[in-house]
Image: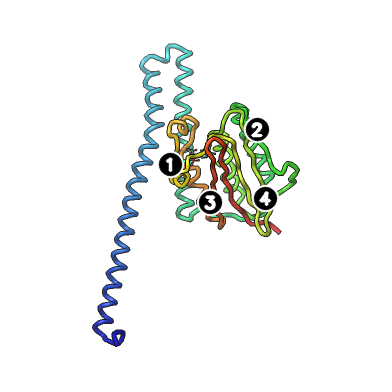
């Protein structure tokens, strides 16, 4: 029998070993390409606000400072670029911590309705600027108790709701919907904006991926929000579902364990 032939056995073992090593090499190559691309992306993203701030400051030094009105305008622009840089570095730190598992989740019982109301308050100015209505459904819901990390879930909801305002339409509506299941709550953030074209949907969770680069930068996005969200939810044994209809809107949803 073949299986008892020592030479044949040795042959199979060697070939298995080679296949395994080949796989390891492929994986290492993939990681190296990924690392190189990530570094290139990060450098590019860092350079953009740095160059902008530099430009404004140099123009000021070269004389623009003499006109107080121009000076204020340029200083504001420089400050905005530096704020963007600050947000980017913060997001990079969080992303690297969630990716390496360094950021330990602190699970506790929390009320998502209260968190949503806090976020609505935080985003009031941004919503007013676009005349976006912020709503909770069912309107009468008192509380939604789940087991989760409060700070991280705040960040998740903040990201979805802020995106819904940013990428939604003027005079639109953003609704946070709570749906009770047997053991979970499903939480959805819905907008009635232009939606996300199908071919982009699977990619929006990648670092720095944006459907419309200029729009995202102009609204102050780092392009890391959804990548961070995905990792945080995965640390909660949860994942994100996205459905989007062009011209009708987008719905991001996830589930969290109910507190009992
Ligand atoms: P950003 O910092 O660019 O907002 P995110 O990771 O939060 O980064 O989102 C990635 C991209 O997904 C955005 O640039 C935008 O193109 C798209 N996106 C996210 N949410 C929505 C939404 N509610 N409607 C339409 N597009 C969206």
Q: Earlier in the sequence, mark 3 or mark 4?
A: 4
Distance between mark 2 and mark 4 Cα atoms: 20 Å
Q: Indicate which disc residue 168 carries.
A: none
Pointer 1 residue: 209
- The residue to which callout 2 is attached is 133
Q: Position of residue 27 (x, y in %)?
A: 33, 59
**Residue wearing tag 4:** 179
Residue at 44% from the left image edge and 11% from the top image edge: 67
Q: Earlier in the sequence, mark 2 or mark 4?
A: 2
First reached walking from the N terminus: tag 1 or tag 3: 1
- What is the crowding at mark 1: few (fewer than 14 residues within 10 Å), some, or many (at least 20)? some
Whichever of labels 4 and 1 marks the residue nearer the N terminus, that label is 4
Q: Is mark 1 within 8 Å of ligand 1?
A: yes
The residue depicted at 43 percent of the width and 41 percent of the height is 209
Q: Residue 46, image x and y in percent? A: 39, 36
Q: Quadrant of residue 14?
A: bottom left
Per the image, label 1 sits on a secondary structure element best described as: loop
**Picture quarter with the C terminus:** bottom right
x and y percent of residue 21 in the render? 29, 66
């Amino acid at each position: 029998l073949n299986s008892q032939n020592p030479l044949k056995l040795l042959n199979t073992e060697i070939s298995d070993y080679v296949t395994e090593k080949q796989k390891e090499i492929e994986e290492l190559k993939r990681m190296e390409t990924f690392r190189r691309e990530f570094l290139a992306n990060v450098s590019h993203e860092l350079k953009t606000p740095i160059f902008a701030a530099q430009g404004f400051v140099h123009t000021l030094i070269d004389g623009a400072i003499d006109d107080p009105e121009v000076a204020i305008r340029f200083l504001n622009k420089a400050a905005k670029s530096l704020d963007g840089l600050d947000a980017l570095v913060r997001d990079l730190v969080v992303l690297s911590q969630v990716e390496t598992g360094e950021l330990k989740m602190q699970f506790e019982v929390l009320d998502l309705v209260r968190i949503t109301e806090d976020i609505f308050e935080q985003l009031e100015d941004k919503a007013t600027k676009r005349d976006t209505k912020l709503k909770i459904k069912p309107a009468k819901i008192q509380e939604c108790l789940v087991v989760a990390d409060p700070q991280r879930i705040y960040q998740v909801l903040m990201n979805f709701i802020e995106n819904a305002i940013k990428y939604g339409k003027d005079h639109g509506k953003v609704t946070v919907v709570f749906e009770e299941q047997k053991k979970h709550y499903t939480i959805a953030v819905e907008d009635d904006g232009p939606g996300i074209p199908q071919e982009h949907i699977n990619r929006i969770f990648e670092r720095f991926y944006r459907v419309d680069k200029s729009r995202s930068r102009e609204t102050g996005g780092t392009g890391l929000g959804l990548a961070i969200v995905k990792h945080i939810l995965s640390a909660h044994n949860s994942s994100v579902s996205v459905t989007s209809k062009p011209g009708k809107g987008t719905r991001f949803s996830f589930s969290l364990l109910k507190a009992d």
